[in-house]
């Protein structure tokens, strides 16, 4: 397996080893937080320790960093793979430099979002981080499957990342809001993200089958050339006789 293939597999490895376990831990801590809050509201003594709320928030911070990090790794693999294969650095070094700076700016915006306390700064850095992901996702070479956006691994991942960033930006507002509206927003976002990650597991498995490894590319390209003429076409599977 070449280095390029190892980088390609780094994204699913991070998701399986880090993201999915953190999601399970967050769901467990979130249910405990809700149980403790309801017991205290009813005037009962809760056996759930108070520290569970802090653990829930901290794990959410880790999850957001892991999700955004895994997304950036996947985008970097596609984008810089295209830069190398098309020799874009020699053709347009300014564009390549801007792409590199955009990666740095996105990571810096996320780091500053963790440190921001005022609402306007949290909103600013959340927007900048989200914009960075969207702009990077629009670059050439990113495997998007826009014609099938409703079942696209890319779009599921981008939407999940944006929702995680938004959820991170409203954490402090949740504890200051007496009306519990931000808490309800957080619950809805978390539920949608959980559904998106179920879709991510399904579409991610499909993407691993559709994106060839480096040693497979010559054979797939040869098959494409044999079955296609100069016009765009889609390679159909060879029918099997019963």
Image: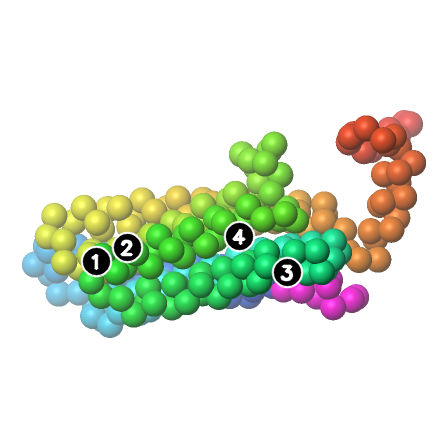
- Residue wearing tag 4: 136
Towards the viewer: 227 or 35: 227
The disc at residue 123 is 2
Q: In this view, does 42 lie above or below 149?
A: below
By secondary structure, the bulk of the magenta-drawn segment is best described as helix
Q: Sequence order check: which comes first, mark 2 or mark 4?
A: 2
Which mark lies nearer to you, 3 or 4?
3
- Residue wearing tag 3: 93
- What is the image's colouring? rainbow
Identify which residue is drawn at 20% across, 70% down: 50
Towards the viewer: 159 or 125: 125
Q: Sequence order check: which comes first, mark 3 or mark 1?
A: 3
Q: What stretch is highlighted in magenta?
A: 1-10
Q: Sequence order check: which comes first, mark 3 or mark 2?
A: 3
Residue 119 spot, x, y in % from top left: 21, 58
- Residue wearing tag 1: 119
Q: What whole-number distance in Å separates the C-alpha atoms at marks 3 and 4?
A: 17 Å
């Amino acid at each position: 397996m070449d280095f390029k293939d190892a980088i390609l597999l780094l994204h699913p490895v991070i998701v399986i080893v880090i993201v999915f376990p953190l999601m399970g831990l967050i769901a467990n801590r979130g249910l405990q937080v809700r149980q403790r809050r309801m017991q205290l509201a009813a005037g009962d003594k809760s056996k759930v320790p108070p520290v569970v709320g802090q653990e829930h928030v901290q794990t959410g911070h880790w999850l957001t960093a892991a999700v955004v990090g895994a997304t950036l790794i996947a985008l970097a693999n596609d984008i810089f793979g295209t830069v190398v294969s098309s020799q874009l650095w020699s053709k347009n070094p300014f564009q390549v430099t801007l792409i590199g700076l955009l990666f740095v700016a996105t990571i810096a915006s996320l780091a500053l979002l963790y440190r921001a306390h005022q609402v306007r700064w949290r909103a600013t850095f959340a927007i900048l981080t989200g914009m960075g992901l969207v702009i990077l996702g629009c670059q050439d070479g990113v495997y998007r499957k826009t014609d099938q956006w409703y079942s696209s691994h890319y779009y599921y991942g981008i939407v999940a990342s944006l929702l995680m960033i938004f959820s991170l930006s409203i954490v402090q507002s949740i504890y200051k809001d007496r009306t519990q509206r931000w808490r309800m927003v957080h619950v809805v976002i978390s539920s949608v993200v959980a559904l998106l990650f179920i879709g991510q597991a399904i579409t991610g498995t499909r993407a691993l089958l559709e994106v060839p490894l480096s040693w497979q590319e010559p054979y797939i390209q040869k098959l494409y050339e044999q079955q296609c003429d100069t016009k765009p076409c889609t390679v159909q599977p060879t029918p099997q006789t019963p």
